[in-house]
Amino acid sequence: MRRFPHLGHGIGLRPPHYQPLLQALRAATTAAERPVDWVEIISENFMVEGGNPRAILRQVRAEVPVVMHGVSLSLGSVDPLDERYLDALDALAREVEPAWISDHLCWSSFGGHTGHDLWPLPFTDEALSHVAARVQTVQDRLRRPILVENVSSYLQFAHAELTEWQFLSALVQRTGCGLLLDVNNVFVSAHNHGFAAGTFLDGLPRDSVGQIHLAGHRDEGTHLLDTHDHPVCDGVWELYRAAVARFGGVATLIERDDDIPPLDDVVAESRRAAALEREVLAGAEAWPAAVKPSATTDERVARDGV
Amino acid sequence: MASEARQPPSLRALQELLYDLMTAPAGVTAALSARGLPPDALDGVIAGDHRLSAAARLDIYANMYFFRILDVLREEFPRTAGALGTDRFHDLITDYLLQARPAHPSLREAGARLPGFLREHACALDRPWLAELAALERAHRELFDGPDAEPLTLEALQGLTPEAFSTLPVRLIPAHRLLVHPFEISRLWEAAATDGPPAREETLLVWRREVTVHHRAVSAEESTMLRRAAAPVTFAELCEAFAGARAATTQDEAALAAEAFQILARWVDDGLLTGA
């Protein structure tokens, strides 16, 4: 049974789109005319006392569902969880009543200092126990299961005992959390570490994914860099197709954080995602060859009728 | 390090090592060298390959740490950065991050200590006004999403009897600051300059009206009234504060009252007052 509702297709709420998005939402007379079905906010950007961000958020929330996506929970840090941060997150959640709250599988702080980045964890049993305990604490505190997102990474640890997908699957099993599957991050990490992106998808529990992120990245020659400053590339669209085939219809979001284009361009990508999802769910597509899953998955797909 | 390479580090030891290396000012290889370690010292910890060594992979994070914060601070302090120039601002932030490492979950707070840091920094020794300019830019940032308050409107005040008006308790909205600068910073704000503003003390009122942050220079009398209005006060008391500030000069009462009311009318027009 799906625990996180399929909200449809959304975009990240970013300052250049505040006014055009509100205008478009208010001008729509039917749900189909809306540019987006829902929006995602970066929680920290709205954990402020007042002013324009909070005013816009109240207005947008009156029009569509909102989900809260954080970048500073630092689930993997050995520092204690930041109680003041959790208080502020909880207070914002009480006001926004988000469909869900998410953050990343990473650490971003040490020794009381924060790096404002999503640093990768070693996929070890020690790290798994540590993160699972903290996810549990956060879920108890927020009185709901959270979604945990896979990050793009540029390094792997020599002493890893698990793959990333094994780590995430075990985290779901131990804590009951859901996953925010960032398809672009899978694509970037697969390239950077030389694993098959389809194997990553194949390794996640089918009912664990509550949301999908789609975004752009940059090719730096030696590696792909997760920049969110480009449109979604063809390879990521193909991988999204595979994700829909595996996980079914899942609330999907276009993330754009830099070189932000006009609202219409981002909405066009969101509509492309919706059309692709419809196409896959209608059974028009089998697994694309580029991300063809393992035989095990083929068997599972046949068994589950996806 | 050699023993760390043979035996997997604990999560704590790993994070301590990586945090130190990623936040080192001159990159990972230089940080390893400073510890007396060769560039391949991380090979037992991080899996490198033919495309990128272990140190080069960690360097990606080191660069992102610095440049993400640099970009945010350049956006928050555009005039300070412009006055310093690209290289000197880069060097300033390098030093700043060593002494004022970010400790708040929000990037919004990363620049909170920059004006104070700049006051003591070598790059501002010959330009002491830089720290004042940075303080004004920081005030704009803080007030942008500072607390909301319902401002008093002229329409609401016009409905009051003269007595109710003069005894109505009011105060300044919370989204305001009163900054006293030893230089005329407001001149510098409008026209970017590198030779600095006149060394004349200036009091600036910074406040948010609806969603936009403004600032303007205020007179000594208005400054006295503003300080008084930081706590609940009546219009009559504000007029008295104005008259007190003018005590040294000879002026008739009616003229003083008219001038004080002119200031108060502007405050209402600017959305500066709220009910106490």
Image (cartoon, coloured by chain):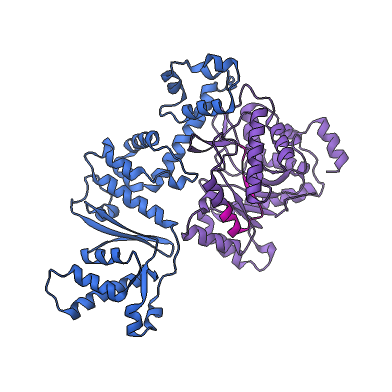
Chain colours: A purple, B blue
**Residue under the point 50% across and 57% down:** A53
Q: Nearer the viewer, residue A291 or B165?
A: B165
Residue A153: image x %, image y %? Answer: 59, 32
**Residue under the point 18% across and 51% down:** B198
Q: Is residue A145 magenta?
A: no
Q: Is residue A245 left or right of residue B192?
A: right
**Residue under the point 20% across and 72% down:** B243
Above or below residue B168? Residue A193 is above
Residue A17: image x %, image y %? Answer: 53, 56
Above or below residue A6? Residue B104 is above
Q: Nearer the viewer, residue B45 or A245?
A: B45
Above or below residue A117? Residue A47 is below
Name the residue furthest right: A303
Q: Is residue B243 left or right of residue A185?
A: left
Residue A215: image x %, image y %? Answer: 61, 43
Residue A122, image quadrant: top right
Above or below residue B251? Residue A189 is above
- The residues colored magenta run A90-105
Residue A198, image quadrant: top right
Q: Nearer the viewer, residue B132 or B274?
A: B274
Q: Nearer the viewer, residue A134 or B211?
A: A134
Q: Does the image show residue A123?
A: no
Residue A21: image x %, image y %? Answer: 57, 60
Q: Is residue A220 left or right of residue B260?
A: right
How many tags in the picture? 0
**Residue under the point 61% across and 24% down:** A157
Q: Does the image show residue B98?
A: yes
Q: Is residue A100 magenta?
A: yes
| Quadrant of the snapshot with the C terminus of chain B | bottom left
